[in-house]
Amino acid sequence: MKWAAIRPRLARAIVCGTISILAVLSIRQLRAQSVTTQYPRMAPIEQYLMEKNGEIALARSAAPEAISRDATILVLGRHRYETAVQGNNGFVCMVDRGLVGFPELPEFWNPRIRGANCMNPSAARSILPLAKIRTEMALEGRTQEIMGRIRAALNSGEVPALEPGAMSYMMSKSSYLTDEHDHNHPHLMFFLSVEDPATWGAGLPGSPIGDVSYWFSSGKTNPELVGLPPIHIFSIGVSKWSDGTSARMD
């Protein structure tokens, strides 16, 4: 199977599982995703948690060792992400749960999702705070208030505007992004404040660049986007996992 054929599945996987969670390859494919809604509510908190050392190792596997070995590592606690290792290179690695994604997606509450993600300094300063808000409020059961809280944080300056050059690595072969088959492929994500993704050729037939709004799977049609700055996640698949081994594309 060629990479172009894999792109739509990767698109749905990344949107369901990360910010982050999240980064994807064709928002047009999202509404037709085949995942059945099996997670109507939050599972017991224990199902989202991991053994600390295992979570640290998985977080580091998001990026090549030269990057992740000196990164700050976050782990999910019962109420929020907490610092487990203080790094010194400005990168922050963590394991995204579905809670950093879009609340309207079928797998938002999927407790199996584990998306290893390593953000560069620009993303750590301007995207990570948004991911923390999403997760903390979801764990509090306040999903309907997430966007209002984020809007207020951006307007007050509590959370800074998106920094130029914000990007992250998702190259772990051990991630679990969605219940869909063939769900995980190594990729890079770039966060850009652009109105029209077509200026990058993102999502067009044959383009290696995928795109989705950071805010909602429903994109511009969602009224809750009013007052939010445009942020798009551009994703590009890569051919190797973080450990240097080849990622099969067939």
Image (cartoon, helix red, strand yellow):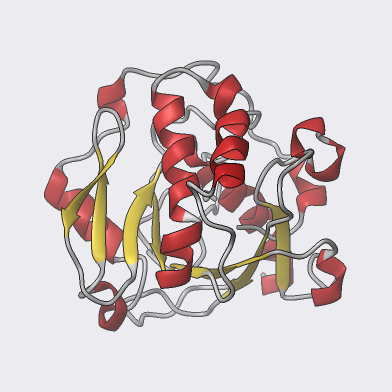
How far from the left and from the top, in percent, is residue 114?
A: 38, 46
Q: Residue at x 42, y 65 (%)?
A: 119
Outermost residue toward the left? Answer: 53
Is 127 situated above or below 105?
A: below
How far from the left and from the top, in percent, is residue 61?
A: 30, 66
How far from the left and from the top, in percent, is residue 53?
A: 13, 51
Q: Tell me the quadrant of the picture where the N terminus can be found.
A: bottom right
Is 206 situated above or below 106?
A: below
Q: Residue at x 41, y 42 (%)?
A: 132
Q: Is 77 in front, or is 161? A: 161
Q: Is 123 in front, or is 8? A: 123
Question: Is residue 204 shown to the viewer in this render?
Answer: no
How far from the left and from the top, in percent, is residue 182?
A: 55, 54
For residue 77, which quarter of the picture?
A: top left
Question: Is residue 67 shown to the viewer in this render?
Answer: yes
Q: Tell me the quadrant of the picture where the C terminus can be found.
A: bottom right
Q: Relative to 227, is 125 on the left or the right?
A: left
Q: Is 118 in front, or is 51? A: 118
Q: Is 196 in front, or is 156? A: 156
Q: Residue at x 36, y 80 (%)?
A: 245
Q: Residue at x 32, y 72 (%)?
A: 90
For residue 34, which quarter of the picture?
A: top right
For residue 46, which quarter of the picture?
A: top left
